[in-house]
Amino acid sequence: MFCNQNYKFGVIPKKDGYMIRLALKPGYITSEQLDAISYIAKNFGENKVHITTRQGIELKIKHEHLEEAEKILNEVGIKLGSTGRRIRQIVACIGTECPNSIGDSIKLARMIHDEFEGIWVPKKLKINVSGCPNNCTHHQFCDIGICFRYILKIDKKECTDCGKCRGFCEIDAIDWKNKVIKENCIGMGECLKLCNAIKVEDRVISIFIGGKGGKFPKKGKWLVDVKTEDEVIEVIDGIIELYTKFGKGRICDFVEHVGIENVKKSLKEKGFI
């Protein structure tokens, strides 16, 4: 049964009960919350839960236990949600627990959750946040993708012409001869380990729009680089405003119909970027 046939937000009717989906804050859940979920699964359901592809949890319960199950979840800070034509469960990587992390993806994902989770949109909208360009959350293949990355440079005064960086980069983003970093650099920063001449010029948060998974996946288009988490919230707010006014299909359809440059222009005119 399709999610837009919900009995209520976060509740999907089944023949022998309801599938309830939880709107979890990204990153972590507490032991107290796990105990509450376990209690519901044991006493009202089938003694098991499903871990969704979007790092969420859903479980089937009997019809008569819906109200009590929701009350128990609310008591530990969990709401039902992440179904239908809404902003879905926000996905984040492990963030600063990872040695490759450039930014705190969980902190940002939780900010996005608090601001936008459950808001109505023309079609389901998925937001993924990666702490570096390793793309562990597949941020370029969802409606709005977010990634922390470096802007790198080569300090010509410190370069000793040792040649260590020549041929090092997987995408050939280091111009060793002219001592510059090319525009195709993804900003992972692995080359920083080579020598002191390669430096971080800036840390940015890249925002992509119009990606999707499914049978016919599409890679999102780069929209803008911003400096702070608050700016990310502003840009998402602008995207949602445009999409809810003018969008009909998924965001990828909206971007394809309007054009990425026109989306950028509209967001600039409204002061979102």
Image (tube, rainbow, N blue to C red):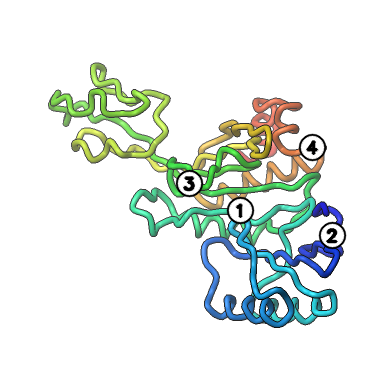
The x, y position of residue 211, in whole percent, is: 63, 36
**Badge 4 vs badge 3, beta-carbon distance below 8 Å:** no
Residue 177 vs 135, above or below: the answer is: above
Q: Residue at x 61, y 54 (%)?
A: 54
Instruction: Provide the residue designation for mark 3.
Output: 136
| Vertical placement of residue 96 versus 147, above or below | below
Disc nearer the start of the sequence (3/2) = 2
Between discs 3 and 1, the one toward the N terminus: 1
Under mark 4, the amino acid is Gly
Q: Residue at x 36, y 48 (%)?
A: 100
Q: CA distance from mark 1 to mark 4?
A: 22 Å
Residue under numbered circle 1: 53
Q: CA distance from mark 3 to mark 1?
A: 13 Å
Quadrant placement of the N terminus: bottom right
Residue marked by disc 2: 6
Which label's residue is closer to the chain start, 4 or 3? Answer: 3
Which of discs 2 and 4 lies nearer the camera? The answer is: 2
The numbered mark at residue 249 is 4
User: Which badge, 2 or 4, is on the more N-terminal residue?
Assistant: 2
User: Residues at badges 3 and 1 in contact (C-beta under 8 Å)?
Assistant: no
Query: Mark 1 or mark 4: which is in front?
Result: 1
User: 70 or 254: nearer the eye?
Assistant: 70
Rendered location of residue 213, percent (x, y): 64, 39
Amino acid at the residue labelled 1: Thr
Dividing the picture into quadrants, the one containing residue 80 is: bottom right
Question: Alpha carbon of mark 3 to alpha carbon of mark 2: how far?
Answer: 31 Å
Element carrying mark 1: loop
Which of pointers 1 and 2 lies earlier in the amino acid sequence?
2
Decide: is 188 above or below 79: above
Indicate the amino acid at tag 2. Answer: Asn
Q: CA distance from mark 2 to mark 4?
A: 19 Å
Amino acid identity at mark 3: Cys
